[in-house]
């Protein structure tokens, strides 16, 4: 077939971008050779529906029969993380309970517990990113945690104000949600967007350019993709976290892949540096209906899945 002599789109993408697997299904990771992996309550819950993972939940409950449900949930997340880290060479992202999204102190305490559980299992904290919702309280928690050597991945990131605040807080990595941004615009306009006009793609490009222009160390990891077109339109982004289904599509595609994001070009951009205090952050978020609505929706969805996980843990024998 024409073009099959060319490396796969996935292998070409790896020349510009670190490929991350977005899954709780660690059994399927080897096929795609990702550097890192990300999880969240929804992905863990999805994995637990498969027979091969049921034993992990039972084992956690059996090993800690007197532990409260919130501790069991953290232990289960860490158990998945350990399995993933045995397969990948890099880092795993493990999420703090979304019910703590508006509590700085609660987020800090839960993140420290997650890191403690990993370290007790012999996993270095350098291999773990603690995922935290990018609320003002979550960003402030990440500021404290980073000072204490806990690396953070700020998730449910939809608005530019969130990205600016995360960079100023010194977080290790952010995960802007490309697909969910597109979903919001599609629902309101009825349009189908090509990748070059995709609002989610354009949002990540704007953030990437801003970070590189002003020398922020914070890594940008595009997330929540709806198509390979979105992914390839962000070739050159620091990292991209991709579902197994889309990884498989990229592995089967042999079309040429070109770089779209480049730090040298970004450093030439004519931009003004921004500084946000809490009042400005909240005002800018209020002005951005998409970011406000999708952040709230995302937190609610993760909370719903966390509650389902709690029910499963409470009922496990």
Image (tube, grey):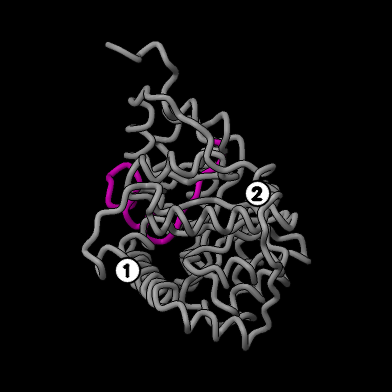
The correct choice, above or below, for 230 with respect to 179 in the image is: above
Question: Which residue: 44% across, 73% down?
Answer: 291
Please state which of residues 262 and 86 is positioned toward the viewer in this rendering. Answer: 262
The answer to if 37 sits in the magenta stretch is yes
Instruction: Kindly identify which numbered label has been placed on residue 266.
Output: 2
Question: Which residue: 60% across, 80% down?
Answer: 137
Q: Is residue 314 in view from this perspective?
A: no
Direction left: furthest residue:
190
Image quadrant of residue 270? bottom right
Q: Quadrant of the C terminus?
A: bottom left
Q: Earlier in the sequence, mark 1 or mark 2?
A: 2
The correct choice, above or below, for 313 with respect to 48 in the image is: below
Q: Is residue 170 left or right of residue 55?
A: right
The correct choice, above or below, for 195 with respect to 178 in the image is: above
Instruction: Kindly identify which numbered label has been placed on residue 308.
Output: 1
Instruction: Kindly identify which numbered label has been placed on residue 228.
Output: none
Q: Is residue 180 left or right of residue 69?
A: left
Please state which of residues 128 and 22 is positioned toward the viewer in this rendering. Answer: 22
Q: Residue 286, position in %: x, y?
A: 48, 84
Q: Residue 303, position in %: x, y?
A: 39, 73
Q: Which residues are magenta?
A: 35-53
Q: Is residue 189 in view from this perspective?
A: yes
């Amino acid at each position: 077939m024409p073009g099959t002599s060319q490396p796969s789109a996935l292998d070409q993408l790896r020349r510009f971008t670190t490929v991350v697997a977005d899954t709780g299904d660690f059994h399927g990771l080897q096929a795609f050779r990702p550097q890192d992996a990300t999880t969240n309550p929804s992905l863990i819950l999805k994995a637990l529906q498969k027979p091969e993972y049921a034993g992990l939940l039972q084992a956690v409950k059996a090993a800690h029969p007197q532990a409260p449900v919130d501790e069991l949930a953290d232990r289960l997340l860490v158990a998945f993380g350990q399995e993933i880290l045995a397969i990948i060479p890099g880092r795993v992202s493990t999420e703090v309970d979304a019910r703590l999204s508006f509590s700085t102190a609660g987020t800090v305490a839960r993140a420290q517990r997650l890191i403690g559980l990993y370290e007790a299992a012999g996993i270095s904290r350098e291999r773990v990113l603690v995922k935290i919702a990018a609320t003002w309280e979550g960003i402030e928690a990440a500021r404290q945690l980073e000072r204490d050597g806990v690396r953070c991945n700020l998730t449910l990131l939809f608005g530019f104000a969130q990205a600016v605040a995360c960079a100023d807080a010194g977080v290790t990595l952010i995960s802007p949600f490309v697909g969910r941004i597109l979903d919001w615009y599609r629902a309101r306009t009825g349009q189908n967007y090509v990748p070059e006009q995709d609002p989610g793609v354009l949002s990540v490009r704007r953030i990437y350019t801003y970070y590189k222009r002003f020398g922020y160390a914070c890594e940008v990891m595009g997330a929540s993709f709806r198509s390979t077109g979105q992914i390839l339109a962000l070739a050159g982004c620091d990292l991209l976290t991709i579902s197994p289904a889309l990884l498989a599509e990229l592995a089967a595609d042999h079309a040429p892949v070109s770089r779209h994001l480049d730090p040298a070009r970004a450093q030439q951009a004519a931009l003004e540096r921004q500084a946000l205090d809490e009042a400005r952050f909240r005002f800018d978020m209020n002005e951005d209906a998409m970011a406000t609505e999708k952040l709230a929706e995302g937190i609610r969805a993760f909370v719903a899945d966390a509650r389902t996980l709690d029910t499963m843990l409470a009922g496990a024998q």
